């Protein structure tokens, strides 16, 4: 293989390319028609090249020059020593998550939790943290959405691992590392794959091995698939397997970050291992090295497992640890003495972490109220979510800032820089960039639905998980009034999925699809099926107005609206999640107020009326007056970009949650407490 092809393979093997606009453009330019067919996966793209195509690329001077430039920049970035984290003496971190939303070609995510985890890892890499992650490698991932007569169907295509940027994790003898995982009176084996995310190693555990029994090979078949027993097995694999994997690798960490309660068995395995070496080790000593983030403001959304199931799968593991039959269960019960109460993974995580947080200020308050009966040494705090800036900012917007506001990439937390820069930005330049992004979305809508929406109309976007509380159909509450609003100069684009077992969510999605096909809204409402991360990029960069209508306070944070801010769109949202912290009266639009509702029907009727009035009297008049709209856009970008990004978020985790006064590095002191084993 030529040096050019070697360099392309090296770039394809590290997801850094996915948040570098020039690297992404390089791969797309190799085979523009084939690029979308392989889900923007450069490993698959290179594999599918014929020998003749490879020779043509390798001998093309222009291609060689482009590859050399991007590869040299990648190498320089990987070798950078003056990162944000350099010299700060920050802890080494293990980050556990059931899903990671890194790219549409890697089907190991379902929605917001995974996308947030992916952005967290990207920013940890950019900031230079000593950071590694552990998740699961699913053989079919999360489902692909297919619409049949307007109804959602779920497809689970198998993943070809040879076409992914992963490599097997090998031991000192050169053979794949295998990790024993408990399952009742038996153990099965999991192997690990390494995925390189910039400077971060992400390890993915895989149970689909020939030597495992068929039922246990299914543990990593699909994300959130199967029944409650399968969910428990997946969480055992993630928590216990994640700790055992890091020990097998000999990697030392100071802090274990549990991203949602799915990971809560990890500190229990840390405790078990530590007590094997020193029986005097206590829960409190393990807690000092564990932090926990909860993302779910709804009690029903937290995993719970009954005694019979937990004992069937973890009873022998618990007995070998020397713990009493109720020890594990009681740690996960709100009321430890209640033998009928199941084990709640969130309660277990709260009790086994020295610090816990919600993902917005409001969510922190909701979480403290929800778990007020769980005695904790530290109250649940909050660190508001953000989004990774260059992954979610469209290349056209990046190019505009490169030209008109150089060095913007070095000022992610500098409010004064963004305030000054947006104030001086030319309206014509900003409008032209926004129109290009909108037209790209409209082209995608036409390509996928056959509909041509008016490029001069206000484009309202709605894309997210179709859970009933998110009220995707709220805007259709009064169809005739909505028709009048759209006729006066607006259009709607929807995208999203409902969980395969959420029948109410699927019914909601079907209603929105029917509305999009109703003759009443011909040429004004479209639904993009097959929702994946690339749809999210199109939607959040191309929409003029981002609609968010959850029943307050059911939205933990929400990050799609933050992506819109990066791309010069405006938010029109219920004051829920992150929006109460961001909205200042002039950087977007707020639907309703902050009152607490008991009657959901009254709440829906009130919010729909406020939404219609807002669109009629404020949003559309502002959009028609271009100067007023762009003034709001600039103010939104100036107030939102330097606050609601994951560089700020991860730095906040590093400085407050991860760092402890007694952080000790094993390579400096040899202190045994710095290993995963505790």
Image (cartoon, helix red, strand yellow):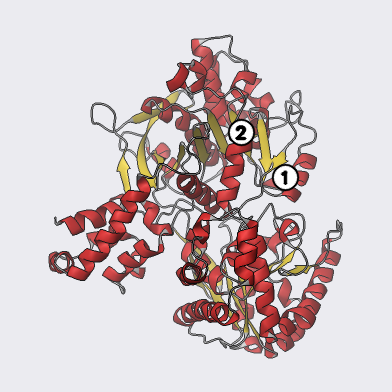
User: In 3D space, how far apart are the residues under numbered discs 2 and 1 (Cα atoms)?
Assistant: 21 Å
Q: Nearer the viewer, residue 597 or 326?
A: 597
Above or below, 163 relative to 461: above
Residue 512 image position (x, y, % from top left): 63, 74
Residue 197 image position (x, y, % from top left): 40, 48
Q: Residue at x 50, y 80 (%)?
A: 436
Q: Residue at x 48, y 16 (%)?
A: 672
Above or below, 149 relative to 18: below
For the residue carrying disc 1, how many other residues have a C-alpha within 10 Å: few (<14), some (14-19), or many (20+)? few
Q: Earlier in the sequence, mark 2 or mark 1?
A: 2
Q: Is residue 136 left or right of residue 284?
A: left
Q: Nearer the viewer, residue 228 or 672?
A: 672
Residue 83 tag number: none
Q: Is residue 315 left or right of residue 353?
A: left
Tell me which corner region of the image, top left, top right, bottom left or bottom right, holds residue 37: bottom left
Residue 96 visible at all: yes
Residue 21 image position (x, y, % from top left): 40, 64
> What residue did someone put label 2 on?
291
Residue 99 image position (x, y, % from top left): 50, 47
Residue 316 visible at all: no
Q: Nearer the viewer, mark 2 or mark 1?
A: 2
> Looking at the rendering, in which quadrant would you find the N terminus?
bottom left
Determine whether the residue tagged by mark 2 lies in a helix, strand or loop: strand
Above or below, 483 relative to 150: below
Are circles 2 and 1 on residues that touch, CB within 8 Å?
no
For the residue carrying disc 2, how many other residues have a C-alpha within 10 Å: few (<14), some (14-19), or many (20+)? many
Determine whether the residue tagged by mark 1 lies in a helix, strand or loop: helix
> What residue did someone put label 1 on?
299
Q: Nearer the viewer, residue 636 or 188?
A: 636
Above or below, 123 relative to 171: below
């Amino acid at each position: 293989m030529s040096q050019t092809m070697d360099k392309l393979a090296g770039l394809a093997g590290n997801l850094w390319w996915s948040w570098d606009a020039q690297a992404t453009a390089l791969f797309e330019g190799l085979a523009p028609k084939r690029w979308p067919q392989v889900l923007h996966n450069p490993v698959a793209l290179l594999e599918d090249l014929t020998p003749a195509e490879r020779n043509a690329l390798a001998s093309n001077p222009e291609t060689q020059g482009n590859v050399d430039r991007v590869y040299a920049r990648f190498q320089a970035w990987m070798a950078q020593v003056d990162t944000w984290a350099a010299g700060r003496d920050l802890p080494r971190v293990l980050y556990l998550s059931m899903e990671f939303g890194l790219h549409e070609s890697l089907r190991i995510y379902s929605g917001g939790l995974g996308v947030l985890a992916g952005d967290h890892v990207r920013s940890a890499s950019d900031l230079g943290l000593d950071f590694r992650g552990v998740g699961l490698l699913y053989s079919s991932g999360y489902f692909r959405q297919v619409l049949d007569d307007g109804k959602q169907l779920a497809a689970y295509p198998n993943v070809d691992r040879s076409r992914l940027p992963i490599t097997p994790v090998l031991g000192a003898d050169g053979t794949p590392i295998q990790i024993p995982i408990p399952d009742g009176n038996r153990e099965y084996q999991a192997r690990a794959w390494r995925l390189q995310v910039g400077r971060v190693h992400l390890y993915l555990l895989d149970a689909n091995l020939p030597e495992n029994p068929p039922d246990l090979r299914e543990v990593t078949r699909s994300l959130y698939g199967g029944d409650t027993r399968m969910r428990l097995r997946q969480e055992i694999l993630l928590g216990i397997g994640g700790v055992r994997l890091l020990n097998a690798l000999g990697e030392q960490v100071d802090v274990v970050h549990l991203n949602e309660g799915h990971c809560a068995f990890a500190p229990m395995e840390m405790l078990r291992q530590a007590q094997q070496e020193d029986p005097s080790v206590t829960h409190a000593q393990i807690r000092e090295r564990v932090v926990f983030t909860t993302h779910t403001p709804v009690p029903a959304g937290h995993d719970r497992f009954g005694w019979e199931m937990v004992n069937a799968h973890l009873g022998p593991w618990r007995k070998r640890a020397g713990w009493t039959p109720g020890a594990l269960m009681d740690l996960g019960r709100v009321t430890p003495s209640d033998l009928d109460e199941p084990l709640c993974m969130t309660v277990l995580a709260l009790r086994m972490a020295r610090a816990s947080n919600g993902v917005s200020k409001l969510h922190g308050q909701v979480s403290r109220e929800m778990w007020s009966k769980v005695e904790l040494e530290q109250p649940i705090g909050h660190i508001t979510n953000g989004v990774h800036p260059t992954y979610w900012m469209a290349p056209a917007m990046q190019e505009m800032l490169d030209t008109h506001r150089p060095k913007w990439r070095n000022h992610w937390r500098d409010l004064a820089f963004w305030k000054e820069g947006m104030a001086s930005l030319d309206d014509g330049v900003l409008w032209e960039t926004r129109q290009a992004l909108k037209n790209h979305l409209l082209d995608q809508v036409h390509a996928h639905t056959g509909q041509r929406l008016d490029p001069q109309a206000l484009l309202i976007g709605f894309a997210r998980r179709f859970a009933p509380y998110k009220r995707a159909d709220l805007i259709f509450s009064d169809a005739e009034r909505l028709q009048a609003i759209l006729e006066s100069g607006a259009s709607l684009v929807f995208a999203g999925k409902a969980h395969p077992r959420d029948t109410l969510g699927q019914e909601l999605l079907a209603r929105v699809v029917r509305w999009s096909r109703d003759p009443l809204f011909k040429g004004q409402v479209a639904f993009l099926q097959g929702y994946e991360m690339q749809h999210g990029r199109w939607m959040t960069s191309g929409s003029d107005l981002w609609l968010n209508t959850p029943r307050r306070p059911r939205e933990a944070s929400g990050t799609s609206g933050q992506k819109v801010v990066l791309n010069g769109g405006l938010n029109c949202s219920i004051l829920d999640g992150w929006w109460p912290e961001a909205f200042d009266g002039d950087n977007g639009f707020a639907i309703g107020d902050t009152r607490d509702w008991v009657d959901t029907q009254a709440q829906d009727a009130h919010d729909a009326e406020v939404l219609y009035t807002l669109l009629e009297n404020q949003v559309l008049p502002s959009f028609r007056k271009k100067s007023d709209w762009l003034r709001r856009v600039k103010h939104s970008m100036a107030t939102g970009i330097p606050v609601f990004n994951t560089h700020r978020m991860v730095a906040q985790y590093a400085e407050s949650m991860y760092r402890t006064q007694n952080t000790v590095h094993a390579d400096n002191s040899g202190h045994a407490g710095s290993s995963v084993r505790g």
